[in-house]
């Protein structure tokens, strides 16, 4: 997310294990040759182009194939759109696409481990760049901390939020979203996956966002839970939470590209605010996260011999936010690991009233623990409290001992034999104990012995000029 103030104003581990998608780029979209189709589904099947509005309760069920997303496509009026496993959806290169699932409508994009569903650029391989298209947006009726339903950012004319905590916006499973993040307005890009007021009835798992020009995942309010999320080489933040999000996420991984970061902002593993003004509006933004692995560039130059200066913090908790982070790994971020940046945020952590940070492995190039903009706690006091609550500080990523986490195009996040990540997870306390959502593990971080990235995720070589 660029600036929260614009929100209401804007309309594998080995390369050989990656799924390769052969996309025919001979055409990226044609106009509908006639108006003779009886339904939107007929039109799409005849043209292979998804454009305009899908509404009036229509159910569009698309078989496996390649489809072109042309312009901003809105699914509303209790309509649904469904993609079969193995489908590839590319953006038109002139009328750049975005798919917006509005309140009361649903998407069913349920791929498989061997046939993921891929949303990507319509440009030929080797010419795809971040911001080639918009992204995927889901909007629901779950609560936010806004008094009236806000408009989602990115130049999208659609509201989100309501009072239905268990609202259902559909299913995303085994999905890749690549090269998204078109800037509709200054400081108002669409993220790879944007979730606004999405409820806990929605199912999200095994989703990867790669080379997005803004955030990989941004969640504005809502109660949606998710598992097995991958943020790869994002320009801005990997996971961004705002406006009263209160869901749970388990098994998340992020990997930064040393040569790619937002030039006008800064790239973090997590950025989180209660809202843009730092108010105490309820519900408080409070993501509950467990078994994450956040991997920064570790001051290691990649192709061009530099690490760009805007690579920032593993997690940046600002503007009166709350948080709960357990059983995770923070490593390789240039400027800080855990950072808190307001009095309200620091007080909620210091007093154990709103926030928790426990049983995590922490490394950063400069400052594993950091505060700024607050007199409530010093960086040293945060470190003392963190170390007393089951966290450990590591002088080098080698002490955490993951197999090959910094190898950009073929990372291996699994712990080596003897790694402290293989044990030490705890499942006590109200956030974790007796909550059926969690898969209780002995290991910390996103991976134990099982590589759930399998063959659906992709860390392909990036040769584009940014």
Image (tube, helix red, strand yellow):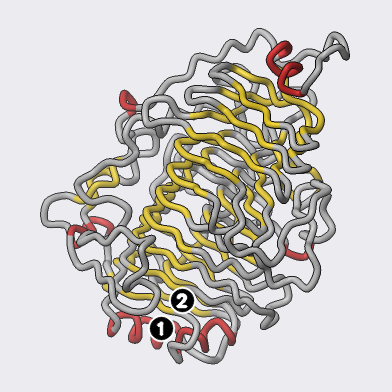
Residue 309 visible in this rendered orientation of the protein: no
Q: Secondary structure at mark 1?
A: helix
| Quarter location, residue 362 | bottom left
Separation of disc 2 and disc 1 at Cα? 7 Å
Residue beneath disc 2:
370
Q: Earlier in the sequence, mark 2 or mark 1?
A: 2
Q: Count neighbours of disc 1 (C-alpha within 10 A) and say few if under 14, some if 14 to 19, many if 20 or more.
A: many
Q: Residue at x 55, y 38 (%)?
A: 211
| Quarter location, residue 161 | bottom right
The spot of residue 372 in percent (x, y) is 55, 79
Location of the N terminus (image quadrant): bottom right
Q: Secondary structure at mark 2?
A: strand
- Furthest toward the left, the residue is 418
Residue 403 visible in this rendered orientation of the protein: yes
The spot of residue 33 in percent (x, y) is 84, 9
Observer-nearest of 397 and 36: 36
Q: Residue at x 45, y 40 (%)?
A: 305
87 relative to 200, above or below: above
Left or right of 244 in this view: 446: left
Residue beneath disc 1:
382
Location of the C terminus (image quadrant): top right
Q: Would you say the residues marked 2 and 1 are in contact, meaning their CB atoms lie under 8 Å apart?
A: yes
Q: Residue at x 34, y 29 (%)?
A: 455
Q: Count neighbours of disc 2 (C-alpha within 10 A) and say few if under 14, some if 14 to 19, many if 20 or more.
A: many
Q: Residue at x 86, y 12 (%)?
A: 36
The spot of residue 438 in percent (x, y) is 35, 61
Observer-nearest of 293 and 462: 293
């Amino acid at each position: 997310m660029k600036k929260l103030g614009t929100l209401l104003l804007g309309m594998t581990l080995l390369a050989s294990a990656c799924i390769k998608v052969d996309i025919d780029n001979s055409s990226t979209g044609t106009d509908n040759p006639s108006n003779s189709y009886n339904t939107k589904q007929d039109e799409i099947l005849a043209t292979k182009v998804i454009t305009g509005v899908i509404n009036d309760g229509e159910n569009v069920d698309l078989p496996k194939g390649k489809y072109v997303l042309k312009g901003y496509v809105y699914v509303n009026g209790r309509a649904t759109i469904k993609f079969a496993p193995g489908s590839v959806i590319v953006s038109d290169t002139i009328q750049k696409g975005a798919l917006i699932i509005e309140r009361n409508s649903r998407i069913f994009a349920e791929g498989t481990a061997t046939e993921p569903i891929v949303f990507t650029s319509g440009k030929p391989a080797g010419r795809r760049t971040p911001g080639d298209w918009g992204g995927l947006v889901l909007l629901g009726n779950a609560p936010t901390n806004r008094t009236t339903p806000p408009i989602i950012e990115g130049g999208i004319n659609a509201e989100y939020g309501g009072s239905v905590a268990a609202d259902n916006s559909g299913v995303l499973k085994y999905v890749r979203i690549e090269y998204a993040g078109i800037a509709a307005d200054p400081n108002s890009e669409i993220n790879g996956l944007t979730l606004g007021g999405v409820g806990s009835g929605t199912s999200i798992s095994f989703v990867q966002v790669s080379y997005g020009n803004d955030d990989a995942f941004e969640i504005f309010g809502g109660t949606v839970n998710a598992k097995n999320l991958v943020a790869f080489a994002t320009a801005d933040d990997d996971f961004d939470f705002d406006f009263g999000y209160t869901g749970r996420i388990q098994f998340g991984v992020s990997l930064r590209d040393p040569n790619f970061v937002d030039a006008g902002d800064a790239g973090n593993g997590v950025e989180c605010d209660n809202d843009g003004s730092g108010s105490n509006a309820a519900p408080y933004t409070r993501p509950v996260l467990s078994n994450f692995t956040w991997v920064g560039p570790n001051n290691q130059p990649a192709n061009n011999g530099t690490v760009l200066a805007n690579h920032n913090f593993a997690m940046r908790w600002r503007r009166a936010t709350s948080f709960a982070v357990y059983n995770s790994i923070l490593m390789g971020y240039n400027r800080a690991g855990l950072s808190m940046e307001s009095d309200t945020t620091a007080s909620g952590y210091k007093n154990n009233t709103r926030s928790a940070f426990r049983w995590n492995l922490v490394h950063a190039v400069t400052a594993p623990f950091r505060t700024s903009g607050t007199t409530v706690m010093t960086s040293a006091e945060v470190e003392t409290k963190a170390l007393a609550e089951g966290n450990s500080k590591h002088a080098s990523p080698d002490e955490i001992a993951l197999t090959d986490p910094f190898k950009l195009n073929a990372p291996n996040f699994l712990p080596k034999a003897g790694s402290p990540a293989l044990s030490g997870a705890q499942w006590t306390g109200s956030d974790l104990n007796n909550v059926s959502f969690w898969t209780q593990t002995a290991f910390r971080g996103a991976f134990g012995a099982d590589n759930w990235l399998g063959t659906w995720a992709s860390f392909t070589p990036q040769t584009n000029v940014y």
